[in-house]
Image (tube, helix red, strand yellow):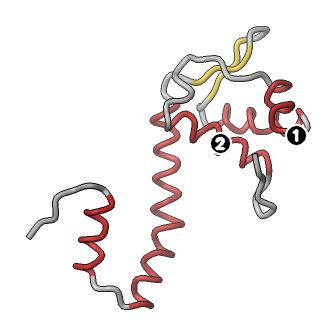
């Protein structure tokens, strides 16, 4: 995994796990790699992975079974989607809207492009 120097590594690890949940690579109640396993796989200190796991536990994405390991929470997919949607709507979308205004992009052209990209039929 290549890390971005502008974001804490523990959050990047958390994002990676969340993306795997959204992509159905990690399923509800499925065991995920241990702190040591993931630390070795990613080449990071186990304390960094532990910080990621603590964060994910705090937002109900994972849970731990003492002596067994960490597992994906039953409602993890919904929780991750809600967090990501909120982040998009409050952080990314305003920046996109600002650029649309700055470039004076026609809303109809934008709508057609979005419809094509999402594979939707264009309304007339």
Q: Quadrant of the C terminus?
A: bottom left
- Local crowd at mark 1 within 10 Å, few (<14), some, or many (≥20)? some
Tell me which corner region of the image, top left, top right, bottom left or bottom right, holds residue 63. Answer: top right
Nearest the camera: 37 or 88? 37
Residue 95: % across, % down: 51, 75
Q: CA distance from mark 1 to mark 2?
A: 14 Å
Residue 50: % across, % down: 82, 33
Tell me which corner region of the image, top left, top right, bottom left or bottom right, holds residue 7. Answer: bottom right
Q: Quadrant of the N terminus?
A: top right
**Residue at (67, 31) in percent of width and height:** 57
From this view, report whether residue 85 is shown above or below residue 26.
Answer: below
Pointer 1 with pointer 2, Cβ within 8 A:
no
Q: Is residue 109 left or right of residue 68?
A: left
Mark 1 — residue? 44
**Residue at (67, 22) in percent of width and height:** 32
Mark closer to the chain start, 1 or 2: 2
Q: Is residue 15 left or right of residue 2?
A: left
Residue 123: % across, % down: 12, 66
**Residue at (56, 24) in percent of width and height:** 73
Mark 2 — residue? 16
**Residue at (81, 32) in percent of width and height:** 41
């Amino acid at each position: 995994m290549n890390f971005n120097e502008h974001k804490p590594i523990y959050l990047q690890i958390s994002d990676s796990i969340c993306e795997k949940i959204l992509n159905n690579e990690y399923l509800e109640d499925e065991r995920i790699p241990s702190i040591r396993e993931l630390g070795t796989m990613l080449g990071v200190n186990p304390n960094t992975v532990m910080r990621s796991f603590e964060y994910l536990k705090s937002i109900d994405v994972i849970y731990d079974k003492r002596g067994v390991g960490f597992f994906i929470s039953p409602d993890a997919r919904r929780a991750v989607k809600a967090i990501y949607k909120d982040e998009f709507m409050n952080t990314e979308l305003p920046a996109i809207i600002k650029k649309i205004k700055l470039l004076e992009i026609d809303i109809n052209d934008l709508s057609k492009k979005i419809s094509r990209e999402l594979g939707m039929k264009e309304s007339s």
